[in-house]
């Protein structure tokens, strides 16, 4: 009997240890991902930092986001699906997480929207809310309110997991929710930088804009006091319905009007007509339907117009010492279409279909000196990228001119081309400053001179108003 009792005690102890080993471990923290930022003002990083501070003040244990990424990669989860319910469930089980906080910042119709979501350990949506700002600034009271909502949804056990922290009073129990298919689809975003762990940073593609499901009616809250009035946001925190989705800032403005000086050189015809470097006045403008539309294929369609007038121009030909006054005008206009791509430097393509012309009229009766005018349809392709988002932009374009129709004192037809490049800066969200160069050449069979070419070069500086 003693031997049987000894064996029984051993088996009982072994079963107790085994059950303890298989018992579910208590969750130990929350992951906060870097907010995706489509505001053009780096508002996402500031909003995330304010939320992290608010969560820390309330005793919430935060887990570094690089731990989440490493655990996801170890389980062969694709970056674009790293925040889907199955992925969150696997990583949360491995890291013993209470939840995952996702966020995005977007700009539409002159306002900034900060969208926050809290996913539970099974990937279910526990809470979602959108906060609106008129200026690119973060209201700490709103982030404090968001932190309270997150703590309330997670329950006292999330705060109790922090070393030395005491459970908050009158915290609501987390509601039982099921995964929202729409949210699950939208949460399949690429991984982001780590959550606020001191001294650690990580560079990852941003989240997709968060769903506005569950957005709170701030106006109703102002009419009826919240249960915890001392924690409620200030009266100026009224939210509007969030936009369907934020759209990235592009290096090509939705609307632009500029004016500035230009300098020109010309060399062409036979005998070659030349002039020293002469000044001009340049006016540029473009307007896209994206100025008025937030989505749809048509929003990339627009119009453009460029004009350049010479000032104080004198012309002659190469073997003559005398110079004669002249007037030169160049202009282009037509339709354009913008194609933008939401990747690192936001490369943008511009398709142009229009009509352009150059007129150079020289005031003299000398037979060798002739005035020229060229008209031509133009088909162009341009490309622009951010050199330093959202401030510095680099662009280039090429136009094919065919057929070129000559007029004034010359006649004939031919073809031509033009090439342009520029470096632009956007300041204070509306001021545009640009520096550029253009060259165009016409090649034609002139009735009296035979095969000739006429080349125009221009350097310009422009200043004006830009919208988005």
Image (cartoon, helix red, strand yellow):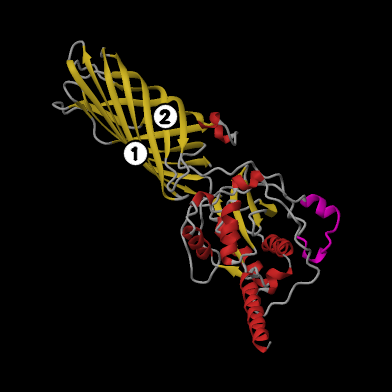
Please give left or right for residue 221 compared with residue 463 in the image.
right
Say which of 155 and 45 sits in front: 155
- Rendered location of residue 450, percent (x, y): 17, 14
**Does residue 141 appear in this view?**
yes
What secondary structure is marked by label 2? strand
Q: Which mark is residue 351?
A: 2
Residues in magenta, as a range: 218-233
Residue 131, compared with residue 401, is above or below; it is: below
| Residue plotted at (54% across, 69% down) | 197
What residue appears at the point 51 percent right and 49 percent down from the top-left corner?
80
- The residue lying toward the viewer, choosing from 5 and 114, is 5
Q: Of all residues shown, which one is farthest toward the front?
A: 1
- Residue 362's image quarter? top left
Q: Residue furthest right?
A: 224
Residue drawn at 50 percent across, 54 percent down = 77
Q: List the residue tagged with mark 1.
A: 421
């Amino acid at each position: 009997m003693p031997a049987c009792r000894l064996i029984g005690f051993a088996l009982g102890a072994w079963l107790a240890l085994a059950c303890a080993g298989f018992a579910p471990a208590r969750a130990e923290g929350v992951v906060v991902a870097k907010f995706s930022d489509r505001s053009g003002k780096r508002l996402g990083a500031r909003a995330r930092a304010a939320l992290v501070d608010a969560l820390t003040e309330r005793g919430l244990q935060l887990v570094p986001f690089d731990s989440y990424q490493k655990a996801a990669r170890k389980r062969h989860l694709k970056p674009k699906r790293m925040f889907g319910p199955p992925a969150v469930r696997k990583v949360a089980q491995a890291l013993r997480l209470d939840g995952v906080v996702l966020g995005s910042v977007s700009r539409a119709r002159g306002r900034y929207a900060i969208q926050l979501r809290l996913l539970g350990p099974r990937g279910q949506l526990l809470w979602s809310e959108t906060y609106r700002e008129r200026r690119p600034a973060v209201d700490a009271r709103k982030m404090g309110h968001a932190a309270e909502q997150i703590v309330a949804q997670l329950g006292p056990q999330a705060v109790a997991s922090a070393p030395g922290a005491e459970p908050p009073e009158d915290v609501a129990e987390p509601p039982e929710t099921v995964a929202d298919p729409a949210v699950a689809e939208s949460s399949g975003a690429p991984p982001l930088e780590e959550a606020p762990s001191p001294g650690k940073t990580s560079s990852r593609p941003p989240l997709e804009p968060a769903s506005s499901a569950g957005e709170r009616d701030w106006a109703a809250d102002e009419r009826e006091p919240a249960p915890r009035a001392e924690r409620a946001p200030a009266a100026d925190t009224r939210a509007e319905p969030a936009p369907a989705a934020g759209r990235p800032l592009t290096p090509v403005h939705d609307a632009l009007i500029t004016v500035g000086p230009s300098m020109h050189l010309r060399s062409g015809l036979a005998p070659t007509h030349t002039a020293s470097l002469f000044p001009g006045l340049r006016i540029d403008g473009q307007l896209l339907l994206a100025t008025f539309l937030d989505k749809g294929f048509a929003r990339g369609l627009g119009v453009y117009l460029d004009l350049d007038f010479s000032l104080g121009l004198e012309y002659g030909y190469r073997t003559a010492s005398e110079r004669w006054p002249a007037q030169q005008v160049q202009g282009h206009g037509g339709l354009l279409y913008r194609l933008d791509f939401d990747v690192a430097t936001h490369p943008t393509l511009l398709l142009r279909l229009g009509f352009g012309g150059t007129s150079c009229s020289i005031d003299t009766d000398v037979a060798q000196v002739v005035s020229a005018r060229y008209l031509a349809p133009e088909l162009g392709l341009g490309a622009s990228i951010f050199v330093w988002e959202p401030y510095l932009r680099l662009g280039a374009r090429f136009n094919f001119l065919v057929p070129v129709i000559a007029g004034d004192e010359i006649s004939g037809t031919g073809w031509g081309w033009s090439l342009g490049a520029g470096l632009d800066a956007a300041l204070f969200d509306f001021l545009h400053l640009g520096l550029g160069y253009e060259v165009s050449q016409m090649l034609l069979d002139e009735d009296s001179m035979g095969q000739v070419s006429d080349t125009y070069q221009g350097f310009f500086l422009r200043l004006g108003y830009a919208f988005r």
